[in-house]
Image (cartoon, rainbow, N blue to C red):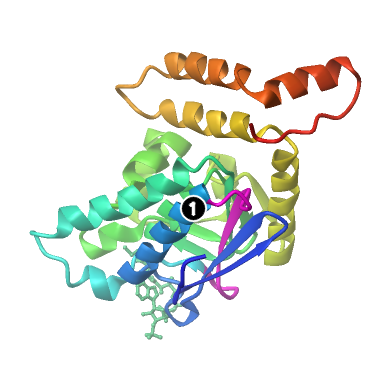
Amino acid sequence: MPDSKNILSEEKLGILYLTINRESKLNALNFATLSEIREIFTEVSDNKDIKAVIITGSGDKAFIAGADISEIAEINELNARKFSENGQEIFSMIENCHKPVIAVVNGFALGGGCELAMACHMRIAVSSAKFGQPEVNLGIIPGYGGTQRLTYLIGRGKANELMMTGDMIGADEAKSLGLVNHILPTKEEAISKAEEIIRKIMSKAPLAIGMIVDCVNSVFVQDEDGYQTEANSFARCVKSGDYKEGTSAFLEKRKPIFKGE
Ligand code: COA
């Protein structure tokens, strides 16, 4: 794993555990942390030993309380677009990762923190978690993909309400809106739930998992024909050894052993 000052990383049994580690600043995302996320996700794509990623925040209070406001206060008209595009690009790397990425939201997920959680493939919240896009309080809007992903995830009316008011919502409301997949009482239990889901996914054909990521994401790309992406991806799966293994194993009444080939 690349050297990271702001992110703790540990790999165990194919799962890469990432902890955003700026607890005294409620794990706010500064530029350095964003660059580290970029480097880590480049490695995740290349490294065959990593099969899945769990992202959480250090401590019990925050997942990520947003982009670092001390840095936001310094951006100007000339570099603001670049600021936004840089974050968008890094969060797209998470969203497009062919290995499952689960956010374990252990407290405040605000602004860029909510945006990062939404870029993950699933979100598991601790019951104390709070979600929100409070950028309007600073005179700005979400800039790391939040206006798009929040709208896709919870629908236009509620997304408008949350972004325009800057209100926070708790885990229960986030789940009822479809922002969160599961709620668990503690961070440890939320991580166990993420591991349970990941272990199940890891027993399936890795190429098919990557194709599901591409097809699901294609729904949100306006100039892409998602049905075409699905048909192409389906055909790619059928070319794989894992397809032969999966179908043979079923017919031979045994468990398949997928190799990701
Ligand atoms: N950027 C930079 N620093 C942040 C931060 C952020 N997004 N969120 C929290 N911090 C820092 C605080 O400045 C404080 O640092 P200090 O101890 O050096 O003064 C520390 O984290 C603890 O935060 P504090 O505000 O004292 O905790 P709290 O429990 O009173 O309030 C929040 C928690 C999350 C409600 C509050 O910190 C907050 O509103 N944060 C900003 C959220 C936001 O607007 N995010 C979107 C940014 S685009």
* Type of the residue with mark 1: Ala
Q: Quadrant of residue 246?
A: top right
In the picture as drawn, the residue positioned furthest to the bottom comes out as: 24
Q: Tell me if residue 104 is in the magenta stretch.
A: no
Q: Nearer the viewer, residue 18 or 44?
A: 44
Query: Which SS class for mark 1?
Result: helix
Find ligand 1 in the image and state its quadrant.
bottom left
Whether 226 is drawn above or below 140: the answer is above
User: Dot 1: within a 10 Å radius of its alpha carbon, few (fewer than 14), some, or many (20 or more) residues?
Assistant: many
Question: Percent position (x, y) of residue 28?
Answer: 40, 70
Image point (17%, 53%), residue name: 81
- Left or right side of 83 for 130: right
Q: Which residue is mark 1?
A: 117
Question: Percent position (x, y) of residue 160?
Answer: 34, 42
- Left or right side of 198 for 159: left
**Location of the C terminus (image quadrant):** top right
Question: Percent position (x, y) of residue 32?
Answer: 34, 70
- Left or right side of 23 for 84: left
Q: Is residue 141 visible?
A: no
Start and end of the magenta stretch? 47-62
- Left or right side of 245 for 119: left
Q: Is residue 6 visible?
A: yes
Image point (16%, 58%), residue name: 80
Whether 110 is drawn above or below 261: the answer is below
Q: Nearer the viewer, residue 215 or 151?
A: 215
Q: Nearer the viewer, residue 98 or 137?
A: 98
Q: Quadrant of residue 129?
A: bottom right
Q: Quadrant of residue 175?
A: top right
Whether 206 is drawn above or below 108: the answer is above
Image point (54%, 28%), residue name: 211
